[in-house]
């Protein structure tokens, strides 16, 4: 639509988008710089292992998440059994549990010194590890299991929605043609849900590639840990940038393959959705199996780790309830609130330009700004360090030119780098949320504003903003939670002496003392439950 949009609005949009993609561009440029043979050494020695472990880990986690999520999604969407209404949202709770906390809890349970193996040795009178075989928890397979338990809700949520929206008439037709429940699922429901499953698998793969804490705790060398070790161990920004570029290629290849695989797939359903009467009522052994499956899944993925965390917190409450706990909590609150406010403000401007501008090219800024969400935290941290380091040096060189003492590392030595990285990574969330809310605002309101000769600022402030409050709140809430949980970027970019809840908990996990950080971990989990509850309420209203 045509609106007299001032040049300042569009120019500001392009400037902001350029700033937000600056880390990605700087990373690509830095990757071409010489690295004093560090990358060559890695290439000749351990880089193939890093790449192999990363790819195998992503494959195992994607397969594991699919095997866990699809049966749960089908049972919740198409069957009726005791507890189904509760399980449909309870199975989302594992998303609030950081994977490295789950890894620590299960390592503590199943390791050689854990209660499970101690009990087995006592019962069977085994004397040592040579008397029996027990799977190694700290391994590539162990890391895949831990990540699958935490990440399967991505696929579960999308698959559940896809199964619920499938036409019941098509399923009835398959039954009339002689297909049983299993053949109907395998030949009709599963292929129809393929687009949703592909998106879920892509999300799981990207989250797996971005994970640092779990694989580092299990001592599994991947590209993520390689970037971290190369920067902090070798001090080579160029080599870290080269490794980061390889990770980016892997991520973009996943996204590209997912889109290419379903480029020609189209789905048309004249009737969508199912009623309560369309669900299969499970009885007898089938009912017990369905209830047991969902119960065990919930127990392993969330209840057991959370109960153990609560036990740790109670036992070590006196040591945990300290001034440092409040300091780190306030740091997390301050950073998360600041990032949320900045993301909402910037997103509102970018999406507003896209809404009212008649030119197609003015949709570019919001799209460019959204690319950061696919970048893993460690990779993004390196991309942020490159331009901010040059800016710091430039500022100090200017002071030196005038024979003045420079301010030092004003950007990379403060929370500025951390806030900038979080904004780049999470602004896609607020952009998507506000765009979705804009779709529900009739264009006739904009036309009415044009006839009343309203300026763009008045249109945004008086008309759009009151109607976008739900989308703004949802986006801000999600960004706040993600900023609270983000660990890799915080580890690399935090100023000296600065800790938040995520880094505080991870330090204790690294030192095998999660008991002392359990209270902080519980705060992270409880805060992470807020958007899940909000999401579930939204889904219930739609259904």
Image (tube, rainbow, N blue to C red):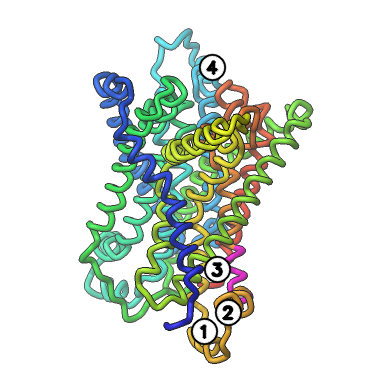
Determine whether label 4 and label 1 are within 8 Å by CB.
no
Q: Which residue corresponds to mark 2?
A: 459
- Would residue 5 appear left or right of 203 to someone viewing this image? right
| Coordinates of residue 257 in the picture (x, y in percent) | 25, 52
The span from disc 4 to disc 1 (Cα, nearest Å) is: 67 Å
Q: Residue at x 40, y 10 (%)?
A: 130
Q: Earlier in the sequence, mark 2 or mark 3?
A: 2
Q: Which residues are magenta?
A: 466-473
Does the magenta-highlighted stretch encompass residue 468? Answer: yes
Where residue 327 sits, quadrant-wise, is top right
Does 291 sit left or right of 497 as displayed?
Answer: left
Element marked by disc 1: helix
The answer to which of marks 2 and 1 sits earlier in the sequence is 1
Compare residues 108 and 470 and report the one nearer the observer: 470
Compute the Cα span from label 3 to label 1.
31 Å
Q: Position of residue 276 (x, y in %)?
A: 48, 73
Query: Nearer the N terminus, badge 2 or badge 4?
Result: 4
Q: Are marks 2 and 1 in contact (CB under 8 Å)?
A: yes
In front of the other: 213 or 442: 442
Q: Position of residue 351 (x, y in %)?
A: 48, 68
**Of the residues under marks 4 and 1, which one precedes in the sequence?**
4
Image location of residue 483, percent across then percent down: 57, 46
Disc on res. 540:
3
Q: Is residue 537 above or below residue 118?
A: below
Magenta stretch containing residue 208, yes or no? Answer: no
Task: Specify few, some or many for label 2: CA neighbours under 10 Å numbering under 14, 14-19, or 20 or more.
Answer: some
Earlier-in-chain disc, 3 versus 4 = 4
Residue occupied by mark 4: 113
Marked residue nearer the N-terminal end (3 or 1): 1
């Amino acid at each position: 639509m045509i609106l007299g949009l001032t040049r300042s609005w569009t120019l500001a949009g392009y400037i902001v988008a350029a700033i937000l993609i600056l880390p990605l561009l700087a990373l690509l440029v830095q990757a071409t710089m010489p690295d004093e043979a560090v990358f060559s050494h890695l290439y000749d020695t351990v880089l193939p292992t890093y790449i192999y472990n990363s790819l195998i880990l992503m494959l195992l986690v994607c397969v594991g998440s699919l095997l866990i999520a699809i049966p749960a999604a089908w049972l919740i969407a198409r069957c009726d059994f005791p507890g189904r209404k509760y399980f449909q949202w309870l199975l989302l709770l594992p998303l609030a549990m950081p994977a490295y906390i789950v890894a620590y809890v299960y390592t503590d349970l199943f390791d050689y010194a854990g209660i499970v193996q101690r009990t087995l040795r006592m019962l069977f009178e085994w004397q040592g590890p040579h008397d029996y075989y027990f799977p190694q928890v700290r391994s590539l397979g162990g890391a895949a299991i831990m990540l699958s338990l935490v990440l399967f809700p991505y696929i579960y949520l999308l698959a559940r929605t896809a199964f619920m929206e499938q036409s019941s008439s098509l399923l009835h037709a398959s039954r009339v043609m002689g297909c049983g429940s299993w053949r109907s699922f395998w030949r009709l429901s599963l292929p129809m849900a393929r687009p949703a499953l592909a998106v879920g698998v892509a999300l799981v793969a990207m989250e797996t590639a971005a994970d640092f804490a779990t694989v580092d705790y299990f001592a599994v060398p991947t590209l993520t840990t390689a970037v971290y070790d190369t920067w902090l161990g070798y001090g080579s920004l160029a080599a870290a940038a080269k490794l980061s570029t390889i990770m980016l290629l892997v991520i973009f290849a996943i996204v590209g393959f997912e889109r290419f695989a379903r480029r020609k797939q189209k789905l048309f359903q004249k009737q969508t959705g199912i009623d309560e009467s369309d669900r299969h009522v499970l009885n007898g052994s089938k009912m017990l199996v369905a209830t047991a499956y969902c119960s065990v899944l919930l127990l392993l993925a969330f209840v057991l780790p959370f109960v153990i965390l609560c036990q740790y917190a109670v036992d070590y409450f006196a040591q945990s309830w300290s001034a440092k706990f409040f300091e780190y909590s306030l740091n997390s609150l301050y950073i998360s609130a600041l990032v949320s406010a900045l993301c909402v403000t910037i997103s509102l401007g970018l999406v507003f330009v896209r809404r009212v501008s008649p030119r197609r090219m003015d949709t570019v800024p919001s799209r460019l700004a959204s690319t950061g969400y696919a970048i893993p935290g460690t990779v993004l941290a390196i991309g942020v360090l490159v331009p901010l380091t040059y800016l710091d040096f430039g500022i100090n060189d200017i002071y030196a030119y005038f024979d003045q003492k420079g301010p030092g590392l004003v950007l990379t030595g403060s929370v500025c780098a951390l806030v900038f990285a979080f904004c780049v990574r999470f602004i896609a969330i607020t952009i998507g949320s506000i765009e979705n809310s804009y779709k529900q605002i009739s264009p006739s309101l904009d036309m009415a504003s044009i006839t009343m000769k309203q300026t763009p600022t008045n249109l945004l402030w008086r008309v759009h903003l009151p109607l976008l409050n739900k989308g703004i709140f949802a986006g801000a809430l999600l960004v706040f939670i993600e900023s609270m949980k983000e660990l890799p970027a915080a580890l690399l970019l935090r100023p000296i002496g600065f800790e938040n809840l995520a880094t505080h908990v991870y330090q204790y996990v690294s030192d095998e003392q999660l008991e002392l950080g359990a209270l902080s971990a519980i705060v992270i989990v409880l805060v992470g439950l807020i958007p899940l509850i909000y999401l579930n309420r939204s889904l219930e209203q739609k259904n």
